[in-house]
Image (tube, rainbow, N blue to C red):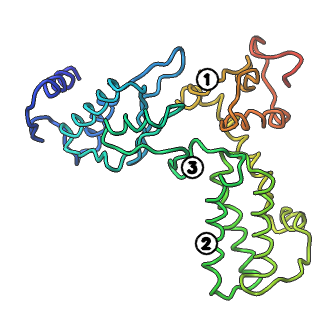
Amino acid sequence: MNHFNTYLDQILNSDQKVERGDFPICSTSPKLLQITVDEATSMTDYCYRNRCRVSHLQFANDTILFANSSAEELQTLKSLLLVFGQVSGLKINLDKSNLFGINLDQNHLSRLALLLDCKASDWPILYLGLPLGGNPTACGFWDPVIERISRRLNRWQKAYLSFGGRITLVHSCLSHIPSYFLSLFKIPASVAAKVERMQRDFLWSGVGEGKRDHLISWDAVCEPRVKGGLGFGKNPLRNRALLGKWLWRFPKESTALWHQVILSIYETHSNGWDANTLVRWSHRCPWKVIAQVFQNFSKYTRFVVRDGEKIRFLEDLW
């Protein structure tokens, strides 16, 4: 990789036009391309105090780069992107890129965006299908879920569906549409009630058939089949279960990046599970509601004592 770094220095300090054959990287080779990406992004590593170092997030063709808000640092970042495009044969489309600021003045953000030749945008943003920087306690945050359910219902308007067909659609589709959001955010009671009402009305009345009486209470309908229900489940209960899954993964994935980020910001108690509630929480922080689930989650866990260093004698179940 020393050859790579030397080559970058040569490009940055000259106006040389780089041909694809000048460097042994081929865009048709995923492995070599990944090496190029890793080496280029490693030059953008930033370390904030004692917290976890995160320079970028990348999934498929979605990439987020993190940087300080100084003009010099963003100019360096822009140069690195241009160099990466030259050595890899890929073109960085800054016109389709957006710059987001955290606690930055809008005028300053606009000047930085002009420097990068990209657009300055506001929060929240949509990343991998989830909104980042929004307020999960606000009903408007959940509009994408409501709209998606509504689109499905509108699509079924022209189809004649039997009662059995509606049961199948509620069970296989409508009940699972909110699951992606429920896996990370706590659903407000009003939103859960609205989703439930849409499911309930569709089950008993179909679409475009007018209102009909609900023959059985919704709580009974949502019971498991072994108890005489249809097994739809309740969204608040499903929400707690999905949030609890993160608590289960947290101590088992201690080397994962997300674990290191959470640990460096919020810390935990000695048992490695219970989040530090003394830290200042943001209402936009998903980990806050996940940590609050621990009180119910801990009822179903038992700690192995071993040397006893991680056990809180009077609080943990062991």
Question: Which residue is painted at 74% across and 19% down in the image?
Answer: 269
Q: Residue 130 got which mark? A: 3
Q: Does dot 1 land on a helix, a strand or a loop?
A: helix
Q: Is residue 87 left or right of residue 294?
A: left
The residue where tag 2 is placed is 151
Residue type marked 3: Leu
User: Which quarter of the figure has residue 316?
Assistant: top right
Q: Does dot 2 land on a helix, a strand or a loop?
A: helix
How far across and down, in percent of the image, does residue 18 sit?
A: 10, 37
Q: Is residue 196 left or right of residue 248?
A: right
How far across and down, in percent of the image, does residue 2 sit?
A: 21, 20
Residue type marked 2: Arg
Q: Decide which of 288, 238 is in the foreground and name it.
A: 288
How far across and down, in percent of the image, does residue 238 sit?
A: 76, 52
Image quadrant occupied by the N terminus: top left
Image quadrant occupied by the C terminus: top right
Q: Decide which of 17, 35 is in the foreground and name it.
A: 17
Q: Is residue 261 visible?
A: yes
